[in-house]
Image: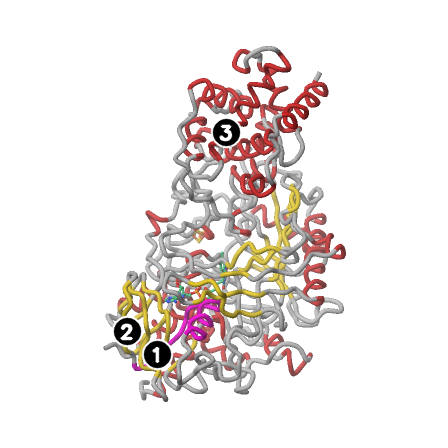
Amino acid sequence: MHQQLFRNQKELSWRSGLSLDRRTALQLMLGIPALIFGASAGNATSGAAPLDPKAFAILGNFLDILLPKTEESPSASEINLASRIIDLSRNVPNYPSLLESGLNWISETSQLSFQSEFLTLHDEKKEAVVTAAFAQADQTLPRVFAKRLRDDAMAIFYSHPASWPALGFEGPIQPSGFLDFEKAPVS
Amino acid sequence: MSNVIIIGSGAGGGAAAWRLTSKGLKVQILEAGPSFDPLTDYKQDNSDWETPFPVKEGSQGGYIVAPLQPLTEETQDIRSWSFMNGKYVPGAFRTSFGYHHVRGFGGSSLHFTGEAHRLNPKSMSLQSDYGVGADWPFKYEDLEYYWRIAEKISGVCGPSTEQRSPKNDRVLGTPHPISYASQALAAGARKLGLTVTENSLAVNSTPQDDRADCNYCGGCLRGCQRGDKGSIDVTYLRRAMQTGNLTVTSSTEVLKIITNANRITGVLAAVDGVLKVIEADLVILSAGSIFSPQILLNSESVHSPEGLCNDSDQVGKNLMETLLATSTALHPDKLGSHRGLPVDWISWDFNDPISIPNVIGGCRFSPSMAESDVVGPIAYATRIVDGWGKDHKRNMQEAFGRILSISGIGESLPNSKTFVDLASETNSHGLPLPRINSYIDEMATDRLRFMMTTCRNILAAAGCAAPIEEFSSIDAFSSTHIFGTCRMGNVTEECVVNSYGQSFRWPNLYIADASVFPSSGGGESPGLTVQALAIRSADHILRNKGVQ
Ligand SMILES: Cc1cc2nc3c(=O)[nH]c(=O)nc-3n(C[C@H](O)[C@H](O)[C@H](O)COP(=O)(O)OP(=O)(O)OC[C@H]3O[C@@H](n4cnc5c(N)ncnc54)[C@H](O)[C@@H]3O)c2cc1C
Ligand code: SF4
């Protein structure tokens, strides 16, 4: 089923002319570590309107697929990750339109593949749609959208103290430091 | 009017200011950047502690990097890449990731990891011994006295004996213990026959100098909230302020140094954006290796049409950059590798200029989990652990604390294609920005390959899986240690200043920063030597003024 889905998505992205130009795609890709290579965040303000309620709900569902609730750690929605993504998108050029088009793609793909709204799909099917987005060719809209959203979602989620106990991380690093640094960590 | 004006409050400016003010001279520092308040500006105690060193208004100077060289097939094996993000430089040309610096009260030391190294004496005579680079105009022994002062004032802790030093005369604080994770890396290095020693760090291992001891948070590169890291603001500048002889004017960018036919008379500066001429008896230029040559070249006048101190066309020449190779991998065991000081041990085995086979110019190796920024949960989630969903969360739990990273930093020899000149682009005052030109030559490539191979071997010997991320200067200009654009020496045709950092032509102009280095050393961190040289220059000034 998944292979079929991937093929559908490729067709969809080509048909809709959704491939991004290289510069926009590169601008929107993350992943360069800041300290060695000094990545700097864009600071242009888009002034774009926030998402409509349905798109916002799809965003929330999408993020919960990326970061679901587990026994030790909360879900994306439990820490209001979708709102944080919207805040972030206001300061990054092209981000609001990436969000809008990416979420449209999720909706259309869900309709095309499962004849249902993304919001009404069971988790397994939602996961299939998300998998499809990641599986598109480099620099296509769904892939840039999924990758960018993933990295931002991870960055926001793992800066939230609620995400740390599952890792055995007792942060933030100050004021206590790590006075046990010479010993094996307590697992 | 202040007796002395110092341009910049980093390692050079701060150390010179301390020495002069403590001997009674009135000094005014003109600092382009803002002040940083450790408690409010640094984020170590916030949930977003993983954000990089803060950028404040005016804390980054403008510069341009000229287009860099094409990348070749032959260097594919030492490119920067990550298993999650692919090649960090996907294009056909070497790319700039920046001259990393801080404009602010304390300069780039605010951002540094506190490494405090003397130079290897053998790397101070590269021209005489091996026909490359340039000799220092004095010997290791001539700088010993000043290194010792710098070690004391910046509070260096480390081993008193060291394989490279001719004498074991260092009086340092107790060395810092090596972290559990770094011990695992050290074991790998030792298996390869390398010698591992505690690093010398300007970080308090016990409370001293009215400053706390380190609590091993690992966050030095993000700015130390605790104040135990011996950055210039809490060491030299704090002491200089206590003398009552220092005035600091922040947010003041010096644009030009002004002269008459014989002497420096003052500077033109933008004070909070307003242009002002500030008169001076004597000027010490300490703006660092990129901005010092910019100021000199922008100071051209009828008295010096090619730019100040540029009669021999040497200003901006001989730029030496950071040559870095880093490899990162997962260890099978949970090591808690986010804990401990960033660079707690060092191996100097390949630091001598001819210790790398078929290459002149040495290097050093040390742990780099913090410098590679692979310590926090965000780094793991975006660079180490791929995927999403429940599997991702499980894999995060398994991976966290298992990352090990090791770096080599090597000698950077000058070449004719690596220099600073003026760009056609200008700053807000219409003056040209500095332009960095950088080129990695064959010998540097070989040195990088040796460093990368050794890093990989250390990780493998430590029991790690295959590397998952690597960085190298082969495809990225990315410099934290940068030197040499106003070389000091005895030969006017080859240098900008004499061995005391004094201009050959303008007796009341000194340069005291990393730009005066004739050679970079084999991977030593430069800060301590910048401080020692600045104190030495200050003593020369004091002697000339008849002050004891
Ligand atoms: C991330 C990082 C880690 C590092 N780690 C280490 C380490 O562990 N150990 C070590 O020894 N070194 C380290 N270094 C390098 C070290 O910080 C520098 O070598 C050292 O600070 C250089 O001293 P400097 O005086 O030449 O320049 P800086 O310290 O950069 O000081 C220059 C000062 O001049 C000011 N200035 C510039 N232009 C003007 C102008 N036009 N007008 C007025 N003021 C101006 C700047 O604002 C700045 O304050 C590190 C650097 C970085 C960035
Ligand atoms: S490791 Fe020590 S020196 Fe570094 S920031 Fe933490 S407390 Fe300061």
Tell me if the residue at label 2 has its CB under 8 Å from ligand 1.
Answer: no
Residue A158: where, in percent of width, then height?
49, 33
Q: Could you tell whether B94 is left or right of B117 in the image?
A: right
- Asked which secondary structure carries label 2, the reply is strand
The three-letter code of the residue at mark 1 reads Ile
Examine the image and state in which quarter residue A32 appears. Answer: top right
Rounded to the nearest whole Å, what is the CA distance between mark 1 and mark 3?
Answer: 54 Å
Q: Is residue B282 magenta?
A: yes
Mark 1 and mark 3 residues within 8 Å of each other at the beta carbon:
no
- Asked which secondary structure carries label 3, the reply is helix
Viewer-nearest residue: A171 or A144: A144
Residue B371: where, in percent of width, then height?
54, 52
Q: At x 50% / y 31%, what residue is drawn?
A: A153
Label 3 belongs to which residue?
A99
Rounded to the nearest whole Å, what is the CA distance between mark 1 and mark 2?
Answer: 9 Å
Chain containing mark 2: B
The image's mark for residue B258 is 1
